Amino acid sequence: MRLQDKVAVITGAAQGIGLGIAQRFSKEGARVMMLDVNEDVGARAAADISGARFFCTDVSDKAAVDSTVDEIIADAGRIDICVNNAGILRSGEVLEISEEDFDKVLSVNLKGAFLMSQATGRHMVAGGGGSIINMSSVNGIMTIPNILPYNVSKGGLDQLTRVMAVALADKHVRVNAIGPGSILTEMLQQVMTDEAKRHAILSRTPMGRCGDVDEVASIALFLASDDASYITGQCIYADGGRLALNYTVPVPD
């Protein structure tokens, strides 16, 4: 197994991509520490994964992050992998979106990843190395005007990835990112029931389909494992060709 006896911390792990990564890591031998603000859903998810522990943690709160990481170290003795997957989205017109919404998105999506990377990274350095994986997005490069805070947070996360990768390279801590496109999480599955929205999503995806959570989890597994031992400072995009596209493609009715 590719992650045998590794200790992996995953934020936003109650559902969707985070849960898929937790499940895959556990199957590959890792002991999984699952963080989320959704306590009921997160606790139930962790109960179904062998050896997993759940922590109700707000990643935008430094005291909460530090306390959770301390508890993980007290229990497991080490941290080898951190997946910064926690993220939220707020929408609105560029000239109308509130300061509160802007601050909240950046606090979770960007500051949360920074705080978690600092807290877990210190233990990785002390333990001789590790892997940090940030969940970015195609929206870190391309723009959708009505989700400005999300776009900004993911662009910042890409730069955080590169800066920390360079800073920690000589300490044997690799820092990379994953940039998903349209992935069939529970939320997107609901969106795809609207034919107009389904058409819009598929028309900008050359492969003509949405991605599966397992496909993103496979990239996370690769980046967390020794198979990616010479890779740092990179973002791998799982987008069905979306970023390579400069036009829309026809979609069968």
Image (cartoon, grey):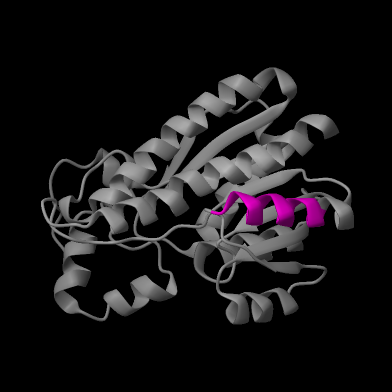
Q: Is residue 234 visible?
A: no
Q: Quadrant of residue 11?
A: bottom right
Q: Quadrant of residue 209?
A: bottom left
How many numbered markers are drawn? 0
| Residue 117 highlighted magenta (yes or no) | no
Residue 251, placed above or below residue 120: below
- Which residue is at 79% across, 51% downward? 70
Task: Give, as a single range, the part of the protein colored magenta.
Answer: 61-72
Q: Is residue 157 visible?
A: yes
Q: Is residue 165 left or right of residue 79?
A: left
Expressed as whole percent of the image width and height from the top left, the position of residue 160 reads 48, 32
- Which residue is at 28% across, 75% downward? 191
Expressed as whole percent of the image width and height from the top left, the position of residue 238 reads 42, 48
Query: What predominant SS class does the magenta segment belong to?
Result: helix
Q: Is residue 117 left or right of residue 86?
A: right
Expressed as whole percent of the image width and height from the top left, the position of residue 75 reads 88, 58
Determine the residue located farthest toward the top in the rendered image: 170
Q: Is residue 233 left or right of residue 170?
A: left
Q: Quadrant of residue 64?
A: bottom right
Task: Between residue 218 and residue 31, name the one nearer to us.
Answer: 31
Q: Is residue 237 left or right of residue 219?
A: left
Residue 29, placed above or below residue 152: below
Image quarter hosting the C terminus:
bottom left
- Which residue is at 45% across, 57% downward? 87
Task: Between residue 178 and residue 250, name the one nearer to us.
Answer: 178
